[in-house]
Image (cartoon, rainbow, N blue to C red):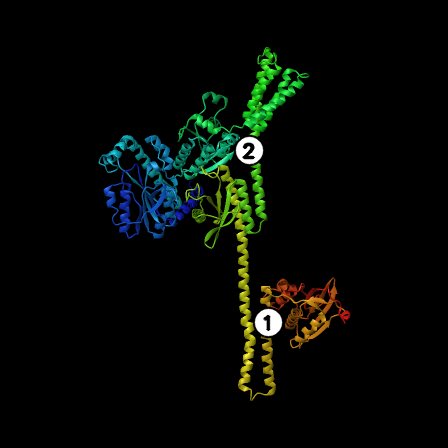
Amino acid sequence: MPDERSDKLGRPSPDALLEKANAETRGRLKIFLGAAPGVGKTYEMLVSGRSRIADGDDVVIGVVETHGRKETAALLEGFEIVPRVAVGYKGHHLEEMDLDGILARRPDLVLVDELAHTNAEGSRHPKRYLDVRELLDRGIDVYTTLNIQHVESLNDVVSRITRIRVRETVPDSIIDMADDVEIIDLTPDDLIKRLHDGKVYLANTAERALTNYFTAGNLTALRELALRRTAQRVDDQLLNHMQANAISGPWAAGERVLVSVDHHPRAASLVRYAARMASRLRAPWTAAYIENNRSINLSEAQRDAIAATLRLAEQLGGEAITLPGREASEELLRHAAANNVTHIVIGAPKQPTWREWLRPSTAALLIRKAGDISVHVISGEEEEKSPRRGVAAASETPFDLRAYLLATVYVGVALCVGIVLDQVLDVRNLALVFLMAVLTSAVLHGLRPALYSCVLGALAFNFFFLPPRFTLTISDPESVLALFFFLGVAIIASNLTATVQRQAVAARQRARTTEDLYLFSRKLAGTGTLDDVLWATAFQLASMLKLRVVLLLPEDGSIVVKSGYPPDDTLDDADIAAARWAWEHNHAAGRGADTLPGARRLYVPLRTGRAAVGVIGLDGDRREGPLLTPEQQRLLDALADQAALAIERVQLVEDVERAKLAVEADRLRSALLTSLSHDLKTPLAAILGAAGTLREYFASMPEEDRKDLLSTVVDESERLNRFIANLLDMTRIESGAAEPNSAPHYVGDIVGSALRRAAKILSHHRTKMLIPGDLPMVRVDPVLFEQVLFNLLDNAAKYAPENSLIAIDGRADDGFVILEIADEGPGIPPADLDRIFDTFYRVSKGDQVRAGTGLGLSICRGFVEAMGGTIAATNRGDRSGALFTIRVPISADASKPDELA
């Protein structure tokens, strides 16, 4: 569809630009298209390949079939031919194109004959055109050949022309993605002459071909199809060029096609007709199946037919949907109105005329109610003829003897009740008792047991209650009318009741599915780990789809089983290859898919907006037909989308955490390097300077100067020792190795020890300690607690001016001993209060303040918390200065100091 907005604004179409960008990233595809075998497609492909070799390109032959034609075989000389690979099939060895060998060789161009060829079972792809698509995705150019009868959308047209249905077909999307389509044209007379000359087939084969397929009329019609299809592709290329370059033109905009499909064999021909119509109109199209009450009674074969038709629509480039509803015509028109559909394609009704009067067909209702929408009623062709009896048998539900026996019991109970009520009720009112039996059968067992109970009840009512009794003869005309009205009411009531019952069953199933999906979404929202998400997903998929499930996620460049239900982590080579291919290419692979169908499981990628995050593997006991019904496919899509988002959410959280850790590690690394460059260099420079001066001038230096220099060496060495000790303490805390050796101790003793150790640092400050003698003992590690107090005193000495007071107060409060260290410095800026204990964080300070490492307070918090206490920093309220408060628990097994004495 052209982009209407690009027309109005004069800008290139985004869709056309995207298609052009995608084409630039993959290899170029050129198709040599012919109307019939023998027109010279392979010959022309080899000639074009020789031209590319002459231009200096690397060209190889993947597979070329000469069919014994000498002139074609002669052109193979000079080409590099990639050896074919042998594939075992039922005791025979078949040769197929070596896809992996070509990918490893990576030529500029590969020649691949017979695009519609079916690969031997066991190959990676069941069709050769899928091999070609993978080559293109890897950036390798491909030249290939194709006959018009192998185009999927023209398959039924060709079969009507030639009376031969071709089984090997190629989706139209392959032709649509071709960069060049070259028509290899030959007139019917020239082609028939080549057949007579033996240049196409051997003599016997050529004679049969001339009689059946290669007639002048057939070849003319096939030639027209080939020319039309090529012209259509050229027209599409021109349209894309105009859109990509914002060239104005008359656009065929606004057309949309909707085709209604069902379980009948002709549905495939309707889908092909809709695909051809949409292609001519350059319009998007949709294949819709209406799921109503009758869908419940469909057999497995009919459900498989519906699934195959919807898959055919997707292969031909359409959208496949299933719409729940009561009446097909109403749902089709509702969808058409909501999606701006302009054409509806539907099959011609097969029912007799008299039934049209009683119940109009869907086609008749559409024509009557469509309004401005064009309705195309197509006869269609059944691909496989089958006897009507077989079809009817296939659609019948299994015979349930138990339902009919219970219906007999219900009528018997009604008969007994009627005999009891016969004494008090009029005979015509007794019919209501039998009507209850009919309705009970309809509600509990469906329509057919209800009809059986209707007939049985009418016979019992006639035999036991209508005169003359105990015979099937009816003497009273009123009784005849009563019996017939009873039958009519019973049939209508049973039909309505059975319909309501089927609708109720379908509604309960949908409600159960919706409830399960809702509960699953809530479960995923509440899970925080990847293992929980995977387990919940595997269990939900297995329980709702009734299949065995494995979940695989990428790990170290490969894909491995992470969860399953039932638990299963054994995959053979074919399954591993299919799972890896599904993950890498973001497409389904394995059982029932186009890629690696020999695998035991079907592998479906878990997709999000970014990429595939994993793969779901599905396996069931059913070995014939598709693994998933249309309802299961829709359910799988819904579950897979929720699971993929949950997995991505967990992975994103992990990515964010890793990013935070990386940022924090970089910050700490940068802070450490800054601290090392300053806090190591400064004392080392002072030590080296003092030591160098002593070495040069020791003999002539006055005694007082020597003492000052030696004091500088000692002071700076102690400062350097404290810095290294802080680094070691911080390493112990972050590694979890800071295990306190706690025991009951008196806080006053530890404070006194810390003051003596910090005496030199506090030599220019006044200190005041107010620790009550009866203060309860605390359970701490004295070495760690002394280091905490030393760091706090060192911090106060840095920021408090000289001759200011540093006070240490202690008190007991509610099971804790509280120790406060207050200074008279400028205090802590309010913006820094929350980060004051962070590693390597330093509060901005003036030039006269002695530099710190940014580790002291962080070590204080680590040691205090390791001993079960807390530490906090605030500003003093009565004056300027910082206040650090330590709370440590009182020891439960220790007495007060005076009691110990």
User: In the orientation shown, which residue stands out farthest toward the right?
Assistant: 899
Mark 1 closeness class: few <14, some 14–19, many ≥20 residues within 10 Å: few
Q: In which quarter of the image is residue 235?
A: top left
**Position of residue 35 measured from the top left corner of the image (x, y, whole percent):** 30, 36
Q: Is residue 758 at all visible to an observer of this figure?
A: no
Image quadrant in which the C terminus is located: bottom right
Quarter of the view holding residue 866? bottom right
- Residue 282 placed where, x, y %? 40, 38
Badge 2 is on which residue? 506
Checking the image for residue 99, the label placed there is none
The image shows residue 38, relative to residue 680, as above or below, that is above
Which residue is farthest left? Answer: 197
Residue located at (53% from left, 68% from top) = 673
**For the image shown, how many numbered marks are present on the structure?**
2
Q: Which of marks 1 and 2 is nearer the N terminus?
A: 2
Q: Is residue 401 visible?
A: yes
The amino acid sitting under disc 2 is: Ala
**Disc 2, SS:** helix
User: Looking at the rendering, in which quadrant would you find the N terminus?
Assistant: top left
Q: Nearer the viewer, residue 478 or 666?
A: 478
Query: What residue would you read off at disc 1?
Result: 725
Of residues 829 and 817, the one drawn nearer to the viewer in this rendering: 817
Q: Where is residue 134 in the image (x, y as percent from the top left)?
A: 38, 47
Label 2 crowd (10 A; few <14 / some 14-19 / many >=20) = some
Element under disc 1:
helix
- The amino acid at mark 1 is Ala
